Image (tube, grey):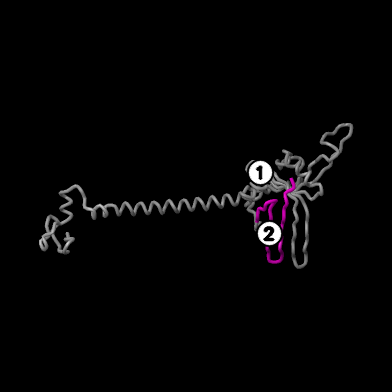
Amino acid sequence: MFCTKCGAKNSKDDKFCYKCGSELENNVNADNPKLSTNEKEKDKLPFLKNKKWLYSIVAVVVLLLGFGGYKWYNRNAFAKAVDGHIYKVTDKTVAPKNSSTLHYYVAYKIKDGSLYMFTSFDKRGQSILKQALNNNHIYNFDSDGYNEYKNQYTMRYKTSWGDYYDYDGDYDYDEEDIDVTKYSVNSERYYDAYNNIWVVSDEKYKVKITKDGYKKSLKDIDKINSITATRVD
């Protein structure tokens, strides 16, 4: 044991330094249950270090949870924003030899933990898709209305001057083929109904939710594709 005053080495049983006569602190504390200030600080150090480690661990966990929560929200934000709505779409592709512009309607619905996207190229698509959203059969790929590949549903819908019912009298109806795609809510996978498997989506669009709809953009090696969807319901 070393003297805290002069630094001389003493035996552990000594109460006073043989060189300068000062009391040796450890033996004073052994007789006195009240620790000196220095000893108290020394005793606190391991505890403080443990607390610092604890705070560091908690901070890391919070950051990871926050980042994971943000990623979860960001991936699911699109589905929540479009759920139950109908959009008029302008789809532009710019390529050196084959540029094009398409116009069509899409509607979305979250059902049974999945996001369904319905597409109609008919000029009456808004009215057609409004009825499609409420057609329970369209959410069942085993329904009779689906084609053999189970990606297109032929829906019978009422026109503006008729209704759904077959009866002798004044009525009218028509049929329209609706493209149907079933996605996971985070849009990372789509359902191949024909083979009954989920497939990882290779779509690399950048998506931006706007005040009146959304925008998607894709820059590839040989083309640029931009989609502008405006809500119409």
Disc 2 marks which amino acid?
A: Ser
Q: Secondary structure at mark 1?
A: strand
Identify which residue is drawn at 11% across, 63% down. Answer: 19
> Of 117 and 214, which appears nearest the observer?
214
Left or right of 177: which side holds 186?
left
Of all residues, the one furthest to the bottom in this rendering is 96
Of all residues, the one furthest to the right in this rendering is 169
Left or right of 11: which side holds 79?
right
Could you tell me how far apart the alpha carbons at marks 1 and 2 are, in whole angstroms?
Answer: 23 Å
Q: Position of residue 162 (x, y in %)?
A: 85, 37
Q: Quadrant of residue 175?
A: top right
Instruction: Give the magenta-colored segment's residue range.
Output: 207-233
Q: Position of residue 176 (x, y in %)?
A: 81, 45
Query: Please, what is the dominant secondary structure of the magenta stretch?
Result: strand
Q: Which residue is mark 1?
A: 110
Left or right of 40: which side holds 90?
right
Identify which residue is drawn at 76% across, 44% down. Answer: 129
Mark 2: few/some/many CA within 10 Å (<14, 14-19, 20+): some
Q: Is residue 216 visible?
A: yes
Q: Earlier in the sequence, mark 1 or mark 2?
A: 1
Residue 217, numbered circle? 2
